[in-house]
Amino acid sequence: MVASTAAMVPSDLRTKFEGWGQSHVFKFIDNGMCSEEEAQALIEQLKGIDYPSIKASVEKAKEDLKSETADADYEPPNDNDVMKLSAMTPEDVKRWETLGLSAVAAGQVAGCVLAGGQGSRMGLGVHESKGMVNIGLPSAKPIFQLFTERLTRLKTLSGKPSARLPFLVMTSPLNHSSVKQFFKDHDFFGYPEEDVVFFPQGTLPALSLDGNLILESKSKVSVSPDGNGGLYYALEKEGVLSKLEAWGVKYLHVFSVDNAILKPADPWFVGYCIEKNAQVGNKVVWKSSWDEKVGVIATKNGKCSVVEYSDLYNPAAGIDNPMVRAVGEDGKLLFGAGNICNHFYSVGFLRDAISRMNSRYHLAYKKIASADEKGETVKPKSNNGVKLEAFIFDAFEMAERSVVFECKREEEFTPIKNPFGADQDSPDTARKAISDMCKRWIETAGGHVVGEDLFEVSPLVSYRGEGLEELCKDKTFASPGQL
């Protein structure tokens, strides 16, 4: 041992990790390869790691996977709990909208964007979020601004522009500071600063395939965000749920950052869930074909859940559930309610569910960067470890009252998974979808957009096409352009 840094390790910490069979975490410290600052950083990180708990969670996840695969019984959601587009009447929509906007005016609604992902496929740095991306609309507004301005418009529509409509932004430890700074640099896009709440999801150490902690560098154990289901733990740990309760918020709308066309705190959806007294609501788009590879809202062993495509159809694993191709009397797929990470919760349900989550995680086999013998970080070519992830739908099965609400794909779902230039699920396809939607709004309001270029209606002007008649009737607009 090299005394200069080896002596820095508290004896009780060393004894604990040696007892767990994890003494390798000290090897760079003991070999004198760490500076004092690096050694101290690793020591502080190790103090917060409960290895037996992590190892137990991995083993439990393995057992859960075996039992779920062997015993799962899947059924489509109950028709009484599904509101399809074909069944919606103008009277229904108006009633839900009134309920939703009344809840907004009363300060009972909050929106929450899941913005902790790294967006590596888009070429973003580890400290950035997709919400910071300008997707190329005429206004050059980033995704975070689109969401924020839609919430601002909702408050106006509620008849009480001063209403508190909290906007929660779940980050990761990697991008938390940069996301907060991004909002600050843009003056919170005109939103009340006190109503924007940033909170990081948690992280969990990765383990090697033989169950040991992985050193990412000389001074750091490899960790990763705990999945979108980390929302539940973070709401509690960071005091956000208590803050919502203190503010009198009763309903929370949770959505993914990578859907730029999304309608946050949608009063139609929120109003429907309130009317049904739902604890959990899932807004969905119906699958375009049975083999579209997307998870669906269904029941698993009698409980609301998201069933992955591979759980219904995976020939390589001998899975071919004939129900995956079955259609109902309306000709639509029975297993067709495609999950788009667009969820409603009653705050009361969240409080109860969080207390019963019991650290349930799922395994993901990954290529995990690790330190070589020189302490330099290298990326493997094949899977060398496992990460634990919590799924947001793990809590759904705890709900006694859950509903499904169908929306129009072309107006509410345009995911961004791929980089600029890709012809599918990219910023290019997202901005075209938004432009096409806005052009339809203009035409419906009696106006006309000339040209094939992009056209945008500011969210501050219209949330979903309302209020445009006076601005657009008998008028012509050139593209590219914006209103």
Image (cartoon, rainbow, N blue to C red):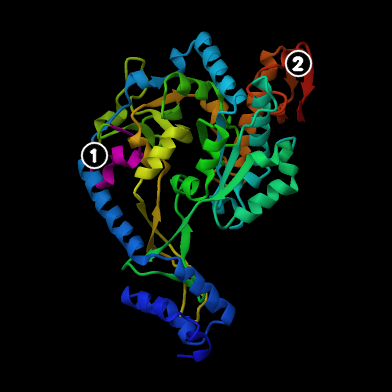
The total of numbered circles placed on residues is 2
Task: Measure the C-alpha gap from mark 1 to mark 2.
Answer: 54 Å
Q: Considering only vertical position in the picture, is 449 above or below 184? A: above
Residue identifier under label 1? 72
> Given the current orientation, which residue lies at the most extreme front position?
246
Q: Residues within 10 Å of mark 2 (few under 14, many from 20)?
A: many
- The answer to whether the residue labelled 1 contacts the one labelled 2, judged by CB atoms less than 8 Å apart, is no
Measured along the vertical axis of the image, is residue 3 above or below residue 254? below
Q: In this view, does 125 lie to the left or right of 136?
A: left
Kindly identify the amino acid type of the residue bearing the numbered disc 2: Cys
Q: Is residue 33 left or right of residue 75?
A: right
Looking at the image, can residue 142 be seen? no
Which is more toward the observer, 231 or 13? 13
Q: Does the magenta stretch include residue 306?
A: yes
Q: Which residue lies furthest to the left in this view?
A: 71
Task: Name the residue: 77% across, 29% down.
Answer: 481
The residue singled out by tag 2 in the image is: 472
Q: Residue at x 78, y 21 (%)?
A: 477
At mark 1, the secondary structure is: loop
Question: Which of the image's four quarters has the C terminus?
Answer: top right
Which disc number belongs to residue 384? none
Residue 255 percent coordinates (x, y): 52, 37
Viewport quadrant of the N terminus: bottom left
Q: Position of residue 382 (x, y in %)?
A: 40, 64
Task: Please identify the quarter of the rendering in which residue 314 is found.
Answer: top left
Q: What stretch is highlighted in magenta?
A: 303-320
Q: Position of residue 52 (x, y in %)?
A: 33, 65
Do we see residue 222 in this rendering?
yes
